[in-house]
Amino acid sequence: MAMQVVAARTTRPDLSAAPISPSAARIVAAASKPDVSVGELGRLAAVDPAFAARLLRAVHAPSFGLRERVTSIPHAATFVGVRGMRNLALGLALRDLAPRGKGQTVLSACLRRAAAAQAVARAMRVDPADGFTVGLCLEIGLLVVARADAKLAEALVGLAPSARIEKERADLGSDHASIGASLARRWQLPANLVGAIEAHHAEAPSAGIAAVAWAAERIAQPFEDPEIDAAVERARAAGVTIGLQAETVDEILSGLPAAVSSLAAGLDLDTGEQADLEGLRARAGQRLYEMNVGYEELVRRLEATLRERDALLRQLEEANARLDAIARVDALTGVANRRATEEMLRREMADHDRKGRAICVCIGDIDHFKSINDRHGHPAGDEALRTVAGVLARSLRAADHVGRWGGEEFVVILPETEIDAGALVADRLRAAVDSAQIETAAGTIRVSVSIGIAMATGPGCSGQVEKLLAAADAALYRAKQGGRNRVERGAIE
């Protein structure tokens, strides 16, 4: 699968910002003229010490096989020839365009196409020097892009050709073929070479040098496309299309890594290690293995993270439940607090409103509670509250509710209960408290409660919560006034 590149749109590359030495530009332009002489190119080269030094290194390379040392620039130019001088100048331009310390991938792509085009040109009996020239310029547009965004330029090299052109046009407003052709025009390369550079990504090849450029592009791609074997098949098909044997393409493919390294050394360029196709396949397999191992480890970590998250969620739910329970329970007595009791009463009354059934509420108050605190101390009073709460809770049905309303007051909710039955329950609660013995540090004490009870019935009872409580409270007041330790009924007004 081709690599996916996500990048912000980059401004269209500025060709005027592409820095190459004036001497190199002059030599490229002059070498493209049909009537230029080697002597004239030698004189142009002598003006630029850097180019002159490069020329001398080129003629002393082992491929020239010179037996004596050449120190004269005009003499060296005669060995290299017009096309060789042009290619040396283009090599210097390539080095000048390369971003410092970056762009190894793009530089390798440029030299790979130069070597491929030179080999294809020889096989097709086209001038190899022209092949080298056009091949060197096929990716040179990406070097311009790399000066502004090296990461984007290197990522583009690894894309499939169609996706790459589409990506370049989307992000740059142009593509590397058009950029390279524009540079070639500025350097006054022959029109047929410019056209070959511009059309090297066409669907079908033309003839001559254009066919060389078209095939060289496809022969270079197996070293860049993650799907190596598919790219090799495309390279062989491209070779057959322009009249080469598949075996010839395989020979060119096998020789490209060494050719790129040799070209890079001659141009003083750092392109890094050049792996052959078998090495790339092995790396791809290793990368796939590492990706699988990494994926499995990622899955394990994700599963562990999910387990930890689920455990934390359970702990959080349990903690929230405990906090909710704490927030709803009276800390001293262990029964519901006032807020929870009022919420339960409102829910029950809304339910009874829908069903049209009766509900009773009792308000009980411990008699003479202040005297217990005064006579036996507050710890005894607290124990009395706990005991009364426990007696009330144990004496009720599962459907009933008891809560501490505040101070020494308790509220009991009796769902689906008529007033007569509710009064009997209230009196049973009163009697249970009256018979309870409360063990305190001051000794055993006994208490009593006065209870007021009132009933509400639907429909419309859900809106009578306050009236129901007021009626029960008024009945409690009458029970106190009537002698305490008794039950009184109240009615909603």
Image (tube, rainbow, N blue to C red):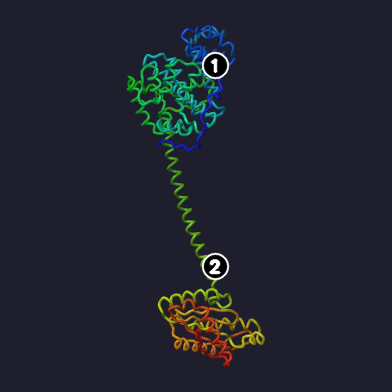
Q: Is residue 127 left or right of residue 378?
A: left
How crowded pointer 1 is (Cα within 10 Å; few <14, some 14-19, many 20+) is rated as many
**Which quadrant of the structure image shows residue 247?**
top left
Residue where numbered disc 2 is placed = 323
Relative vertical location of residue 214 with respect to residue 465 in this rendering, above or below: above
**Local secondary structure at mark 2:** helix
Q: Nearer the viewer, residue 44 or 390?
A: 44
Picture coordinates of residue 99, whole percent (x, y):
55, 27
Q: Is residue 268 left or right of residue 170?
A: right
Relative vertical location of residue 20 with respect to residue 346 in this rendering, above or below: above
Q: Quadrant of the N terminus?
A: top left
Residue where numbered disc 1 is placed = 24
Q: Is residue 281 visible?
A: no
Which residue is depicted at the point 45% across and 80% down? 415
**Local secondary structure at mark 1:** helix
Relative vertical location of residue 428 with respect to residue 303 in this rendering, above or below: below
Q: Amino acid at mark 2?
A: Leu
**Which quadrant of the structure image shows residue 162?**
top left
Q: Nearer the viewer, residue 297 or 333?
A: 333
Judge depth for marks 1 and 2 and give the one in front: 1
Q: Which mark is residue 89?
A: none
Which residue is depicted at the point 42% across and 42% down? 292
Picture coordinates of residue 306, whole percent (x, y):
47, 54
Picture coordinates of residue 146, whole percent (x, y):
52, 29
Picture coordinates of residue 426, whole percent (x, y):
49, 87
| Count of numbered badges drawn on the protein | 2
Q: Is residue 202 visible?
A: yes
Quote the CA–CA distance across marks 1 and 2: 81 Å
Q: Amino acid at mark 1?
A: Ala
